[in-house]
Image (cartoon, rainbow, N blue to C red):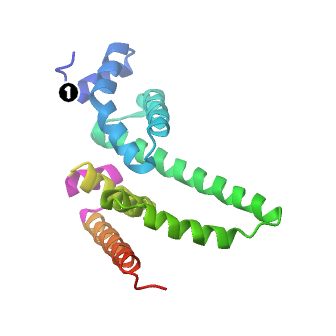
Amino acid sequence: MEHLLDTELVKRAQKGEGRAFDVLVERYQAKITRLVYRYVHDTDTALDLVQDIFFKTFRNLIHFKGESQFSSWIYRIAINDCIDYKRRLKVRKEQSLQVIQDRGYDVADHRAEADVEGIYAAKDQRAWVEEAVRDLPPNQQSVVVMKIYQDMTFDQISEILDEPVSTIKSRLYKALSNLGSVMRRKQVIEEGGLS
């Protein structure tokens, strides 16, 4: 069954053949895990999200009509799940900061100190770039992760995100420009240009 195309496996899985869905999971699990890890940078969280993504894929497979490739469809589910996770995480952080502020602590001073310490602690260039990628807006982050880390073509990204290729290229340009600005600021800080 491993030799079958995605379209045939999807049809069989929609008819209730459990082995067909298992083959789809085996085929995409490593790719989806790498994609998710690039978003969350935590193995346990990534594995939890991947499990959730495949559960959603299984639950919604009956609604898949084949208007796009299965790979595009599952990547879209994965990206949406990652974006939702990051939104939930941001809300939790904001709520935590509010609780600290409500108890009378000055969060701004401590955050600024932590940010400076974090910059100096991030000696590894790759780790710094990955951190900068995580801070990009979600639409730019998606394109960078798929193009740079997943080595997808603009056409593949366009299909997954259901956006024109020109929009994808524009987002990548903006993302790389933003990353360049962040790296220049980092260089100034490391060279002692800011006091």
Counting every numbered tag in the picture gives 1
Quick one: 175 or 130, which is closer to the camera?
A: 130
User: Who's the residue at 43% across and 34% down the image?
Assistant: 50
Q: What stretch is highlighted in magenta?
A: 153-165
In the picture, residue 166 is in which quadrant? bottom left
The answer, for residue 17, to whether it is visible in the render is no
Quick one: 180 or 118, which is closer to the camera?
A: 118
Mark 1 lies on residue: 5
Q: In this view, does 101 lie above or below 162?
A: below
Quick one: 47 or 53, which is closer to the camera?
A: 47
Indicate left or right for 109 with 75 as reference: right
Is residue 9 part of the magenta span, yes or no? Answer: no
Instruction: Specify the amino acid type for callout 1.
Output: Leu
Q: What element carries label 1?
A: loop
User: Who's the residue at 39% across and 44% down the image?
Assistant: 37
Residue 53 location, x and y as percent?
A: 45, 35
Q: In which quarter of the image is the N terminus?
A: top left
Is residue 159 part of the magenta span, yes or no? Answer: yes
State the residue lying farthest toward the right.
Answer: 103
Residue 8 location, x and y as percent?
A: 24, 24
Residue 121 location, x and y as percent?
A: 44, 61
User: Who's the residue at 22% across and 57% down the image?
Assistant: 154
User: Who's the residue at 41% across and 29% down the image?
Assistant: 61
